[in-house]
Amino acid sequence: MVETVFAPWDDPNTAPLISFKNVTKRFGDFVAIDDLSLDIFEREFFALLGPSGCGKTTMMRMLAGFENPTSGSMSLSGRDIAGIPPNKRAVNMMFQSYALFPHLSVWENIAFGLRRDGVAKDVLNARVEEMLKLTRLEKFGRRKPHQISGGQRQRVALARSLAKAPKLLLLDEPLGALDKKLRQDTQFELMDIQEQTGTTFVIVTHDQEEAMTVASRVAVMDEGRIIQVATPEKIYEAPNSVYVADFIGDVNILTGPVKAVGADTYSLNFGGKEPVTAACDRTFTEGETTHLAIRPEKIGIHAERPDGSNAVQGKVLDIAYLGNLSTYHVQLPSGQIIKAQTANTRRISRRAFTWEDPVWVSWSATAGVLLDQ
Amino acid sequence: MRRFVLIAVPYFWLLALFLVPFVIVFKIALSDAALAIPPYMPTMKDGLSAMFSQLDFENFVFLTEDDLYWKAYLSSLRIAFISTVLTLLFGYPIAYAMARAPHEWRATLMMLIILPFWTSFLIRVYAWIGILSTEGLLNRFLFWIGAISEPLTILNTSTAVYIGIVYTYIPFMILPIYAALERLDASLIEAAEDLGCSRMKAFWLITIPLSKGGIVAGCFLVFIPALGEFVIPSLLGGSGTLMIGKVLFEEFFSNRDWPVASAVAVILLLILIVPIILFQRNEQRQQEAEG
């Protein structure tokens, strides 16, 4: 049995559920969305990730119908949706503040959308019960929103937005108000519910860990543009720019001119004693300034010079102890700081290195990514 | 001990400023009119036991016999009710517009609502005479634009009373409704629209229920003082408008019948207690819902 990987974005025959074509949105002089094109496919869990003010919320509000694009077109299932008011779209939204109606019970909140559609009473009852069960809120149906906890309110908001079985569910920072532990549990719950209902989810978040955990694809945004759209692995391991590499997780950037030294291999003179080599299938002209991005966990730390392609010497400047991991900040003679991460498989009393220790940091030629911008 | 002192202060306040005056008025209501100073008898001068033995409910019985009084009460209730509804109809849109106005405008708008209070209430009501009279500003304006050929008679009708009450009490309606609407989270309306409501439907299903506390508070704040209103009906309403406040004034100052005037006041107070208690309940429920 061949299990197909869920990747409709790689199949040119799949029609996208949502399609943005050259969408621009201006608020006065401010350009919130700048000539943006994007396809989102059915059953995807799509994350819009970026710092505040990057335009991710504007994109979501355009999908919901609260804003209209200044130019460009937006379609849902092939139908142009520009100008269609929010109450006429098969799109529902879960608000950041949850926006639960305080004067209605949990049950009535969930039933609200169905009532507007004039659903028959027994169908409505069954659907609300189903939603309560899906979000494990059976016992809380009669309570008012202020009588339940933050995590339960979040689930009511989710149940309410799912009750009408929308084609597309928008989630605006859905877990922002929850504490870290609850947030992690809820991320998996969200994924389960997305899978069970088969609804397409678009989530807006500024938390990269959250985006990486839940999403099938992540779009990294900055200043109204999409910098990169890819699966979480690709975004992390093969970022297309220093911005993406830096935004997602921790990264070391070494900058300098490159020189080709073999097939797909370059040497980069970053200002250290000797240049480092990096493998890359892209072509760079000789002397072009490039950036080598390497993740701290791909850098080893040793007392003696190891055998391997790249090794530089420095001394331990700082140690960030995170419990399961330790990040060593190693200062090179040139003043640059390289972060190297090791898993703490031993107890802390037996840690190999301490402050001011001279150490070697090393990484393989394939550990990093060469980027031109 | 400290708790006792703490509770004693408001109780003393109520006793001195409400209960004692009420007992005095009630005692006068049970007395008989007399050509004396004060114009009633018996008084404390007659001795306590003699005074108590001469008190009776005669004046209250009189109020039920002369239909002027209960007609005045009913007419006051009707006028207070209609003006409350009118004040709500005008006040709600104003409060709504204020709550939806840009943030930097709100303080100014609030100022405009409160500003008239800095002028004497009496002068403002007098000003309406100048506007509403047959030779007044309104008639001259309507004449000038050609809307009328004969002057309208507005002054000395109940229309003028309604205009006066709505004008005077509208801030009491606007402020609590504005407070409720300003607290309203705009994303609730968006959520309602997102779930299939039109703008209008979202207003009825979300905005109105969530500003109910403000509406109820505003209605009581208008209804309660409007019921006993004296200045507006006597200045703008002329002789045609019957309101209990005016009757009370006439009994007291024109007829110098303090006992009957006191009986009228006691009944008015009893009528007002019902809406005041309802108002307090609403406030309490409001606080509980927020807590």
Image (tube, coloured by chain):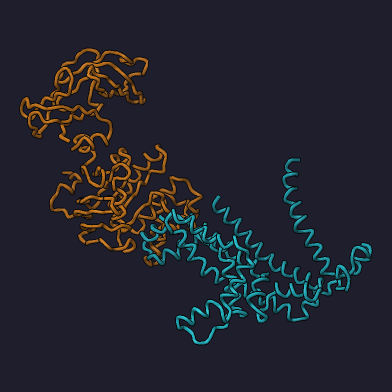
Say which residue appears at 22% left-offset and 62% top-offset.
A79
Image coords of residue B152 (percent x, y):
54, 83
Q: Nearer the viewer, residue A41 or B35?
A: B35
Image coords of residue A258 (percent x, y):
11, 27
Q: Nearer the viewer, residue B16 or A59?
A: B16
Say which residue appears at 14% left-offset and 49% top-offset.
A11
Chain A colour is: orange
Above or below for A18 versus B205: above
Q: Would you identify the image quadrant in which residue A230 lies?
A: top left
User: Can I make out residue A100 in this image?
Assistant: no
Image coords of residue A304 (percent x, y):
22, 12
Q: Is residue A245 left or right of residue B151?
A: left
Above or below for A327 versus B142: above
Q: Nearer the viewer, residue A22 or A102?
A: A22
Considering every residue shown, the one lying at the far bottom of the view is B149
Q: Is residue B239 left or right of residue A254?
A: right
Say which residue appears at 47% left-offset and 56% top-offset.
B106
Q: How many marks?
A: 0
User: Can I make out residue A358 in this image?
Assistant: yes
Chain shown cyan: that is B
Quadrant showing the C terminus of chain A: top left
Above or below for A166 versus A354: below
Quadrant showing the N terminus of chain A: top left
Q: Is residue B130 left or right of residue A206?
A: right
Q: Would you identify the image quadrant in which residue A222 lies?
A: top left
Image coords of residue A113 (percent x, y):
38, 61
